[in-house]
Image: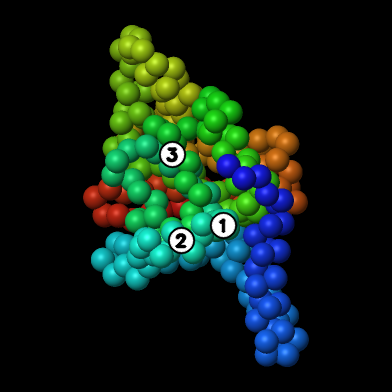
Amino acid sequence: MTIRSMQDPSRREFVRLTGLAAASLSLPLVASAVDQAGSARDPEVVLARLLEGNKRFVNGKLTNPGRSPKDFAALADGQAPLAIIVGCADSRVAPELIFDQGVGDLFVVRVAGNIVSGAGPTVKGSIEYAVAELGVGLIIVLGHSQCGAVKAAIQHIDAKDVLPGSIDALIDPIRPAVTAAAGRPGDKLTNVIKANVEAGVERLKNLDPIVSTAVKAGKVKVVGATYELRTGLVELVG
């Protein structure tokens, strides 16, 4: 993994655009292009782009394949993803597909139950890397319907038993979400899935020193969402 400056993506984009401008000798156009490149990475703009991509996915009108060898080759020297997706390892939840994005668009961190608290330095460090070194401004904690890890947390809390191997430790961080969702009206599993997402969002907003500082400075936006397996629809949580 090559460590780059937090400003690398924007700097590379600026250099590229400046080169184009030199060819045309049009400085006003350069400023406009740089402004457009910056706004395209604005967290609100990126979130709108991903939700629009999800609409295309739901309607079966995908427009952004971006998965051919030439698309990978174009990014061989570096990456500048638009968003971090903290998703579940579930085989049915593929962020690039459900948001209709191409290679290089998303920095995806996947772990069963899309947990953040208790996930350890591997997960949290990956998120911090994307914020500090790649300059990503949007983080989405993405839960999904019928999540097996959340189901296990509910079932084994009720049964007061212990799961074998490392599975018990895996679902342990989800247990507080079970407690937090207690008493909420509606389906218990759905409520715990949302509570688990909310817990992940809150943890990231306060993840010192990198993510929390960027959030407070308005450079990073953290949101929660859930993906409905039956419909393909992504809905924001909270």
At 65% from the left and 68% from the top, the residue drawn is: 13
Is residue 137 left or right of 119 when viewed as pictured?
Answer: right
Q: Mark 3 points at which residue?
A: 110
Q: In which quarter of the image is the N terminus?
A: top right
Secondary structure of the residue carrying numbered label 2: helix
Tag 1: amino acid: Asp
Q: In this view, does 212 lie above or below 121?
A: below
Cα separation, mark 1 vs mark 3, equals 24 Å
Q: Measured from the top left, where is residue 230 in percent x and y?
A: 24, 50
Q: Does 175 sit left or right of 158 as displayed?
A: right
In the image, what residue occupies the spot 26% across and 54% down?
231
Graded by Cα atoms within 10 Å as few (under 14), some (14 to 19) or many (20 or more), the crowding at tag 1 reads few
Residue 180: give x, y in percent of width and height. 48, 29
Could you tell me how far apart the alpha carbons at marks 1 and 2 are, in whole angstroms?
A: 8 Å
Between marks 1 and 3 in the image, the one whose residue lies nearer the viewer: 1
Residue 132 shows in the view: yes
Which three-letter amino acid code belongs to the residue tagged 2? Ala
Mark 3 Cα shell of 10 Å, populated few (<14), some (14-19), many (≥20): some
The residue where tag 2 is placed is 73
Check contact, mark 3 vs mark 2: CB within 8 A: no
Residue 4 location (% of width, % of height): 68, 49
Query: Which residue is pictured at 40% across the width and 47% down the height?
Result: 226
Evaluate whether residue 29 shows in this view: no
- Using the image as rendered, state which of residue 77 and residue 133 is in the foreground: 77
Q: Do the residues labelled 1 and 2 touch (CB within 8 Å)?
A: no
Where does residue 72 sit, x and y in percent of width and height? 44, 59
